[in-house]
Image: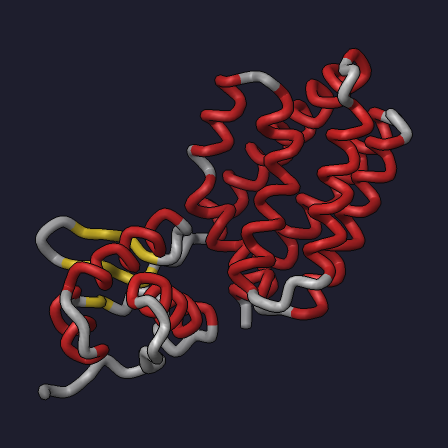
Amino acid sequence: MGAGISGIWPVGRQPLNQQIYESLKQSILLGNLQAGTKLNETQVARQMGTSTTPVREAFRLLAAEGLLKIEPWKGAVVQEYSTDEILEVFQCREVLETLALRLTMERLERSVDREAALERINQEIALSEGEDAFSGFVGRNSGIHDFWIKGSGNHRLIALMESLNDVLLHDRNMSAMDQQRRQEIIAEHREIFEAVRAMDQERAQAALSRHIQNGYRYSLKIRRK
């Protein structure tokens, strides 16, 4: 076997698709695979002792999370975003998400299933507190935000938010690696939820704005390290 790619974690005996995805993801988030690193499908498959099919699927999943950029006929490159791109995304996010939260609360006020909906999001926050795996935490984090994004019922708004997902998921993955930031995120989600449960729209939107601004500041901080 030829020289391997430095920084890739070995594959164990778990299902290949998920194991390769988790291995590459962890290597990227820990900085073992730095921004700009080129990953060749065939070379990664050879190094991990697999066929190219699960590697291709892992690349696709990582690209959907904004961690890789797929370049046709060239392979994949570990993705990074400029501070200008981060600023633009978080500016759009704050406007769109606070609008989504307002629309969701207006719908909840008229809903006969309001208590059940609130209990579902309360359970998601509680489950995120005990989530050990960083991928699991990212999934629950995204699900909590989907409560008011998809709950808005505004399909244009939902599509606009989905267009920001590569950067947002990239940053959620980075945040999940930091235990202190994880705890801050949980507390911020709880503050938003308590305001929603009280049907205090102004307080809920203000709490969500602070949460997004804190996320932006954290995103800049880790890029300066």
Image coordinates of residue 178 in percent, x first then y, are 63, 69
- In the picture provided, is 55 more to the left or to the right than 169? left
Residue 205 seen by the camera: no
Image coordinates of residue 171 in percent, x first then y, are 52, 54
Residue 69 seen by the camera: yes
On-image quarter of the C terminus: bottom right
On-image quarter of the N terminus: bottom left
Q: Is residue 73 above or below residue 98?
A: below
Q: Quadrant of residue 85?
A: top left
- In the picture provided, is 99 more to the left or to the right than 40? right
How many numbered circles does the render carry?
0
Q: Quadrant of residue 23?
A: bottom left
Residue found 12% across the figure and 57% down from its top: 74
Q: Is residue 87 above or below residue 181?
A: above
Q: Is residue 148 above or below residue 73?
A: above
Residue found 47% across the figure and 27% down from its top: 160
Q: Is residue 141 above or below residue 156?
A: below
Q: Nearer the viewer, residue 76 or 53?
A: 53
Residue found 58% across the figure and 35% down from its top: 93
- State how the image is colored: secondary structure
Image coordinates of residue 102 in percent, x first then y, are 73, 22
Residue found 56% across the figure and 64% down from its top: 134
Image coordinates of residue 37 in percent, x first then y, are 27, 69
